[in-house]
Amino acid sequence: MDHAEFRARAHQMADWIADYLETVGDRRVVSGARPGEIQGALAGGPPEQGEAFDRIFADFERVIVPGLTHWQHPGWFGYFASNSSPPSVLAEMLVAGLAVNGIAWQTSPAATELEQVALDWLRQLIGLPEGFHGVIQDTASTATLTAVLTARDAAWARAGRSPVLSCYASEEAHSSVFKAARLAGFMPEGIRRVPTDAAFAMRADALREMLTEDQARGWVPACVVATVGTTSSTALDPLRAIGTVARDAGAFFHVDAAYGGAAAVAPEHRAILDGVELADSFVVNPHKWLLTNFDCSAYYVRDPDLLMRSFAALPEYLKTAADSEVVNFRDWGIPLGRRFRALKLWFVLRSYGAEGLRALVREHVRLAALFAGWVDAAPEWQRMAPVPLGLVCFRHVPGGMTDGPELDAHNRRILEFMNASGEVFLTHTTLRGRFTLRLAVGQRTTEEHHVRRAWDLARSAVAEGVRGHSGLK
Ligand SMILES: *Cc1c(COP(=O)(O)O)cnc(C)c1O
């Protein structure tokens, strides 16, 4: 493709994206593709001769697009949102065009320095104290793995390599925490799940008991992970109490605020980070609630030297004259090569400003509270957890039905009915073993009428005979 054709195609793609974003709400949220269908439509091997772009693009529209699930649909209530926004998309276009690699400062000084600036702006926006130094990781999973590896190395440095190291997170913590501990080489018995209270938040007293018990048998507590906004129910672990216990035990304290941390852009939600100054590291995902395209996970550490002790790698061929004066982010994480992710975050922070981001969070929290109010007011509907942020956990309990497989199946059918509409998409979880519907409000373009539609569909599911054993098509 020569430059003239590239220019024409780039204009065509920009129009296509703009049309898509304008009309995505008219599509069915979830693809109707059957397993293997897309592979089947693309069978054969790579072409011997290069093909015309028209042919490639025709197949993109014919085969690929119908196989997509539309995360930017305003009826998106599944998992947590994975937002984008027009300024973020524009930055991604520029980044693709530039195709720089931010291995080190010298490999693109602006990539490194903009990352420092954008992450410090984000730090200020969410009220993280000064003294936290940020680096962008691809995902919160990677950031947490980075934290757990740092914690492991610090524990080894302190206690030697023979004792059993232990790592603590609540039973409601994200699977990435337990995966990180496994990957970091923690023994299964040293990976501890701390019980939660009635609101699904970690019990600091239970953590202290576990730590005391484990220290008594000679184990070394390496790491405590608290969650601000758990994935199942957005429970808020009490950071100050947990951080105090972690510090008393000499453990590294990591805060996983992948989803919930974003809410702290609004001062009335700052209390969710009370005690965060006790943390050794902290992660929040701008790619969830803060309008920045996946992937962009902001990881903050209090002591970059501790981080670099685990991650610095300086073979001769990577040394540069600037090394003593600059930050080389390759030494702050696992991969060597690094995408220029700071540009989209900077475009977003400048385009929306603190006010724009606050307004977004406030509207989503308002809509979640509205939905929660409908659930609370409706006979036979039950809210399953507090709603501090943008997620409502709920279920339907028909008269006379008690906890068990029948009630779970009933609610699973409600979920299937709602999603089969193609207008909304919700996912589920279990809380204390009970099947629970999750309505996660967080997509940039979601409005009140979309939330209302979700509630209408939930009630229609019941009205149209999901009740009891009748089942649904
Ligand atoms: C979404 C989420 C994660 C995982 O985020 P990735 O960036 O996809 O790895 C981890 N922890 C919590 C609390 C989350 O909400």
Image: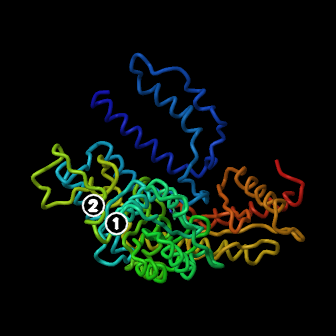
Q: In whole angstroms, how far apart are the C-alphas of marks 2 and 1?
A: 9 Å
Camera sees residue 267: no
**Rendered location of residue 48, percent (x, y):** 41, 16
Q: Which residue is mark 2?
A: 309
Is 96 located above or below residue 118 in the figure?
above
| For residue 472, side relative to residue 33 (left or right) | right
- Name the residue: 52% across, 69% down: 169
Check residue 260 in the rendering and tell me which mark sits there, or answer none. none
Labels 2 & 1 near each other (Cβ < 8 A): yes
Q: How many marks?
A: 2
Query: Around disc 2, counting alpha carbons within 10 Å, would you say few (fewer than 14), some (14 to 19), or many (20 or more)?
Result: some
Pick the quarter of the image with the N terminus: top left
To which residue does mark 1 refer?
154
**365 or 126: nearer the eye?**
126
Name which residue lies at 32% across and 61% down. 135
Instruction: Classify 10 Å Cα crowding around label 1: few (below 14), some (14-19), many (20 and above).
Output: many
Please tell me whether mark 2 sits on a helix, a strand or a loop: helix
- Front-lying residue, 173 or 20: 173
Measured as percent of width and height from the top left, residue 81 is found at: 53, 59
**Looking at the image, which residue is at 47% across and 59% down?**
186
Among the 4 quarters of the image, the one containing residue 374: bottom right
Does 325 sit left or right of 349 as displayed?
left
- Precedes in sequence: disc 2 or disc 1: 1
